[in-house]
Image: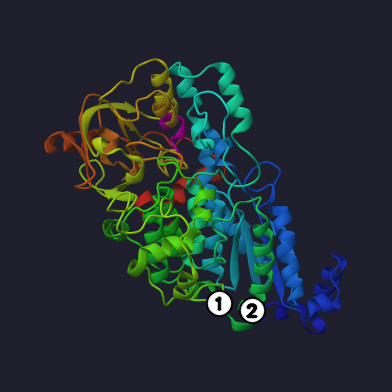
Amino acid sequence: MRSREVIEGVDRCVHRALFKCSGFTDEDLSKPLVAVVNSWNELVPGHIHLNILSQHVKRGILEAQGTPIEFNTIALCDGIAQGHEGLKMSLPSRELIADSIEVMIQGHLFDAMVCLTTCDKINPGMLMAAARLDIPTIIAPGGAMYPACPTWGYYKGRKITVGQLFEVPGLLQAGKITAEEAEYLENITLTGPGACGGLYTATTTQALIEALGMTLPYMGTTPASDSAKTRLCHEIGRQIMRLIEEDVRPSMIMTEGAFENAIAVDMALGGSTNTILHLKAVANELGIDLPLELFDEISRRTPHLCNMSPAGVYKIADLHNAGGIPAVMKQLGDLIKRNLQTVSGKTVGEIVDEAKVYDTEVIRPRANPIHNEGGLAILRGSLAPNGAVLKIAAVTPKMWRFKGPAKVFNSEEEVTSALRNGLIGAGDFIIIRYEGPKGGPGMREMLMATAMISGMGLGESVALATDGRFSGATRGPCIGHVSPEAMEGGPIAIVQNGDLISMDIEKRRLDLEVPKDEVERRLRSWKPPETKVRKGYLRRYCQLVTSADKGAVFKKL
């Protein structure tokens, strides 16, 4: 075991003394040292219960003759960071999380780790650390909160989550709700611990952790406040000791086939566009290439089976009650690779064979899909030569083909101001640029803009393309990750107001309908703007980060 290098031998007396000073005994030090990597804090609703779940993990480790040692890493709340400079820190935090875990694990030579996580960038950050370190690891997703059920007003009789709450400013702007109702919704929509309860980025990545085989069955959808979550965490603590004994490592679990399974599940769910960035980043740590073409190829052959919020009606609790991720994989049948190992000790095929589908309205059979193709699509064209991403699951059929004059903005704030002042109307194609990984920097989500568009009733009459990202809560014809980004001199940098932009989802096209010689003339005269940050982590980030089509990972030095 790795930890013996730290613990054993006469020349390690100081090391043992330091452990003992922290309360560990000789008996504790004789056992495998298991890091319990937590991301609990008092700020993030998705993480406020992880200090409780970690106790159950540690109890399982102790019962199975291991020594658990807990430490924390950072966790941002993307909801609190939305709509201001704070969100520039969100995607960059993914790399910091992976790095900080690497530092703690390698600095103390732990034998294994269990990672407790819930929200957007923490989930992939911990997977990246697991892939990089390649010691026995289980991820313990914290689950989602239950939806709210308003008893009066605009949403009466509907289950709602944070996605609807983000649309409140637009509803107010359009006169569809009152200030009194807005306050009511603010106070009742978020119901307790856990990730936001629709199929947003946090909950999609939790589901994909399970689809990859990196947690126990049903852990990816079990609600945060369900008692089953504590029992599963207890079992995770016991199971990590079996992985140590059998030397089962993440590289044995997260194979190319496992990533293909995760992508297929993503497409069947209609998950967040952010998952493309994150799956590519995790695979990169293992030396596995996931080209954008692979995502589109799997999307073309995988039906969209689950009508999940924000575009649909069902919440994560509904998905769990219908059978969870094993049931989704069961419905996908031969689109899932079965003979793959998971951290549970069972193969994917064994888990699928034991699964039951309890509600075929929530998890439809392949013969009766929502759409014949998957929930995400990769678009290319003269506006996005290196690709762009669209959530088909959130676009109504009448908007699958769209052409309109460009309304060009250089930040999300410019767009929300224009919306408030009535400067954007039906038929417009909104362009938001200089929000990419380098240009932002940090590749913010455009949720404040897209939520206002939906709330104002423009979601089926305008389209939007950006080199930034979208929240999993975004719905409508919103195209993100346009590559190359504006800061790198991509065509999006030279779009002018009034230029015609066209989108064709079926043909997977996104085009700037300007003559080629005019595009070339504009590109020759284009000069990059000044970098927006001069110091700190974001300065280093924009110098190291690659483009969105590569997962916005750091360059290999």
Residue 97 vs residue 518, the one in the foreground: 97
- The amino acid type, in three-letter code, at marker 1 is Gly
Q: Is residue 285 above or below residue 542?
A: below
Q: For residue 266, say whether it is visible.
A: yes
Residue at x-position 73% and y-position 54%: 52
Horizontal side of residue 286 vs 5, given as left or right: left
Res. 193 mark: none
Q: Does residue 525 show up magenta in the picture?
A: no
Res. 345 mark: 1
Closer to the N terminus: mark 1 or mark 2? Answer: 2
Horizontal side of residue 244 vs 199, given as left or right: right
Residue 389 is situated, as x and y percent measured from the top left of the image, at 33, 47
Assign a secondary structure to mark 1. loop
Q: Does residue 445 show up magenta in the picture?
A: yes
Horizontal side of residue 238 vs 527, given as left or right: right
For the record, the magenta segment spans 443-450
Examine the image and state in which quarter residue 453 appears. Answer: top left
Residue at x-position 50% and y-position 29%: 155
Q: Is residue 343 above or below residue 148?
A: below
| Residue designated by label 2 | 242
Closer to viewer: mark 1 or mark 2: 1
- The amino acid type, in three-letter code, at marker 2 is Arg
The quarter in which the N terminus is drawn is bottom right
Residue 482 is situated, as x and y percent measured from the top left of the image, at 32, 43
Assign a secondary structure to mark 2. helix
Query: Mark 2 and mark 1 in contact (Cβ < 8 Å)?
Result: yes
Q: Is residue 2 above or below residue 426?
A: below
